[in-house]
Image (cartoon, rainbow, N blue to C red):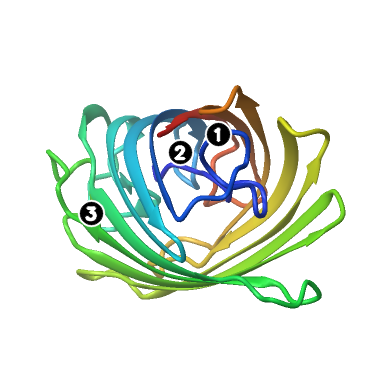
């Protein structure tokens, strides 16, 4: 399964105490556990432990992430896709997943009434240690995202188009949600995520996510989250967290 994550709090800069700098760097690790039947006869449990590094030279951000994947269940489940050519049985497999690299340009308006805009290109490189973990094909995603801070409330919405490799169909993705700032250290958020099916044999994915961003001092942050599926091709539920360190 792909690792679920959501944007950091709007305009909450990295580094110490929110002091603005031109260059930021951070590294982190996460974990996620998901459970569901995904329209298959049995239940599939899956886990992901991604390690990532992020470098930002305002307004450009580069990010690279490599996960360790564990899937216990349907043979056809591949990082959010269902392979229709796979067998109908179940198995347990684990190993290094596909590497994801992204490059993002952020536009910050001078007029506060306007939202900030992020333009992102993301490439999934098929580095999975086994064909039973990754799709074996490269994906390229183009994303447009808007973020607006109104007082203590942050609103965000994004639309993406993903070019899938192999026999998978190209798909649309979308997300919208809000974050509420409780104090300088804590943000709470909720989001709705849509993902079009990449095959004709599976339905679209609809999910609700609850998440938080908790700053632990000047350089450390933890981001717990929970996912609840609203459709057959989604996990029934999922739990996880990210841990990051700002340099």
Q: Is residue 50 left or right of residue 19?
A: left
> Which one is nearer the viewer's eye here, 100 or 12?
12
Q: Secondary structure at mark 2?
A: loop
- Few, some or many residues within 10 Å of mark 3 (<14, 14–19, 20+): many
Q: Secondary structure at mark 3?
A: loop
Q: What's the CA distance linking mark 2 and mark 1?
A: 50 Å
Residue 110 lies, in percent from the top left, at 69, 76
Residue 80 lies, in percent from the top left, at 40, 50
Please state which of the two labelled residues, at mark 2 or mark 1, is closer to the viewer: 1
Q: What's the CA distance linking mark 2 and mark 3?
A: 21 Å
Q: Which mark is residue 135?
A: 3
Task: Give the quadrant of the C terminus.
Answer: top left
Tags 2 and 1 in contact by the CB under 8 Å rule?
A: no
* Residue 83 visible in rendering: no
Going from the N terminus, do you reach mark 2 or mark 1 first? 1
- Mark 1, residue position: 16
> Which one is nearer the viewer's eye here, 68 or 116?
116
Q: Which mark is residue 41?
A: 2
Going from the N terminus, do you reach mark 2 or mark 3 first? 2
* Residue 99 visible in rendering: yes
182 w.r.t. 61: above or below: above
Q: What's the CA distance linking mark 1 and mark 3?
A: 39 Å
> Which one is nearer the viewer's eye here, 168 or 148?
148
């Amino acid at each position: 399964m792909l690792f679920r994550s959501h944007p950091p709090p709007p305009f909450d800069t990295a580094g110490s105490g929110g002091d603005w700098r031109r260059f930021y760097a951070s590294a982190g690790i996460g974990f996620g556990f998901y459970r569901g039947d995904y329209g298959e006869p049995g239940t599939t449990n899956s886990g992901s432990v991604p390690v990532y590094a992020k470098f930002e030279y305002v307004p450009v951000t580069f990010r690279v992430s490599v996960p360790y994947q564990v899937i216990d269940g349907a043979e056809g489940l591949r990082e959010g896709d269902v392979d229709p050519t796979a067998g109908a049985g179940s198995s347990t497999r684990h190993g290094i997943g596909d590497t994801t690299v992204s490059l993002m340009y952020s536009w910050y308006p001078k007029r506060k009434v306007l939202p900030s805009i992020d333009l992102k290109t993301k490439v999934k490189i098929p580095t999975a240690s086994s064909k039973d973990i990754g799709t074996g094909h490269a994906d390229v995603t183009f994303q447009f995202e808007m973020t607006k801070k109104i007082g203590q409330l942050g609103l965000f919405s994004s639309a993406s188009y993903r070019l899938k490799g192999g026999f998978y169909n190209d798909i649309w993705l979308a997300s919208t949600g809000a974050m509420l700032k409780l104090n300088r250290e804590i943000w709470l958020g909720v989001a709705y995520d849509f993902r079009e099916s990449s095959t004709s044999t599976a339905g679209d994915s609809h999910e609700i996510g609850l998440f938080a961003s908790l700053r632990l001092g000047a350089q450390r942050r933890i981001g717990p989250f929970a996912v609840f599926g609203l459709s057959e091709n989604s996990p029934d539920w999922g739990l996880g967290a990210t841990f990051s360190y700002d340099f």
